[in-house]
Amino acid sequence: MGDTARHFTLMFTGQLEHAEISSCDNAYCKYLLVYGDDWRILDGVEDGITQVTRKAGPDGHLVWNFPLDVTFKSTNAFGWPQLVLSVFEVDRFGRDVIKGYGCVHLPIAAGRHVRKVQLYRPLSASLLQQFTSWIAGNPAEFTDAKFPAMGHGREVTRVRSTGVATVNLNVMIKDMATFGYTEEAGPAHHDF
């Protein structure tokens, strides 16, 4: 009697490395993993928050080097996990001000991967609301942290690009071939 796998396993380790946001002097990042109904976390956490960092060095990056470590199991590739980032600045009044949202699918191939995650923030619906939020120091935010990972409703959302975040990931895959998927190594660097 053979020992057939009941699910495939994916392990993602790495780090939220840094962000490049020109209009931001300090920042922290909240992250969240969004995945389909057939996916389960075997080990690790699905959300977290980094420390606050300040711009440093000649390149002016906001460096977190915050560790990521999560293991999933599934029988279906539908709902492949996505990493959602929400970057906030602490302003001079101690308020958390959104500086950018971003989302990227976790790599589908084993190996080391570098992902550049484009950051953006929503714009208010009218010029009056934009002016009022600028005066109050309270820009428009998404009400649901998972919204950047969802397709529904995004086509009517106006956003402004704010920067880019870099994520390094190491991916290990087990038993995907059992479910009809190929397990090939992919390219190490993508700018998404």
Image: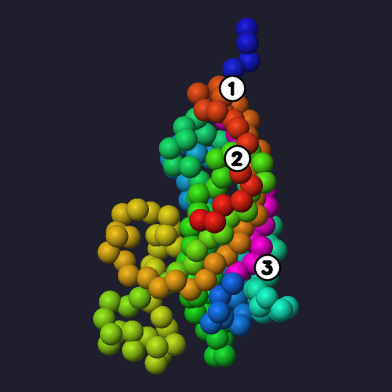
Q: How is the image coloured?
A: rainbow
Distance between the alpha carbons at the discs numbered 2 and 3: 26 Å
Disc 2 target residue: 186
- Badge 2 or badge 1: first in the primary sequence: 1
Up-down: is 120 above or below 116?
below
Up-down: is 113 above or below 16?
above
Circles 3 and 1 in contact, beta carbons < 8 Å: no
* Quadrant position of residue 92: bottom right
Element under label 3? strand
Distance between the alpha carbons at the discs numbered 2 and 1: 24 Å
Choose between 177 and 67: the one closer to the eye.
177
Mark 2 or mark 1, whichever is nearer to me: 2
Mark 3 or mark 1, whichever is nearer to me: 3
* Quadrant position of residue 67: bottom right
Residue 178 painted magenta: no
* Quadrant position of residue 60: bottom right
Give the residue drawn at x 52%, y 71%.
163
Left or right of 187 in this view: 125? left
Residue 84: numbered disc: none
Up-down: is 141 above or below 135?
above
- Badge 3 or badge 1: first in the primary sequence: 1
In magenta, the rendered stretch is 7-19
Residue 64: numbered disc: 3
Give the residue drawn at x 50%, y 49%.
105
Disc 1 target residue: 5
Q: Amino acid at mark 2?
A: Gly
Give the crowd class for mark 3: few <14, some 14-19, many >=20 residues within 10 Å: some
Mark 2 or mark 3, whichever is nearer to me: 2
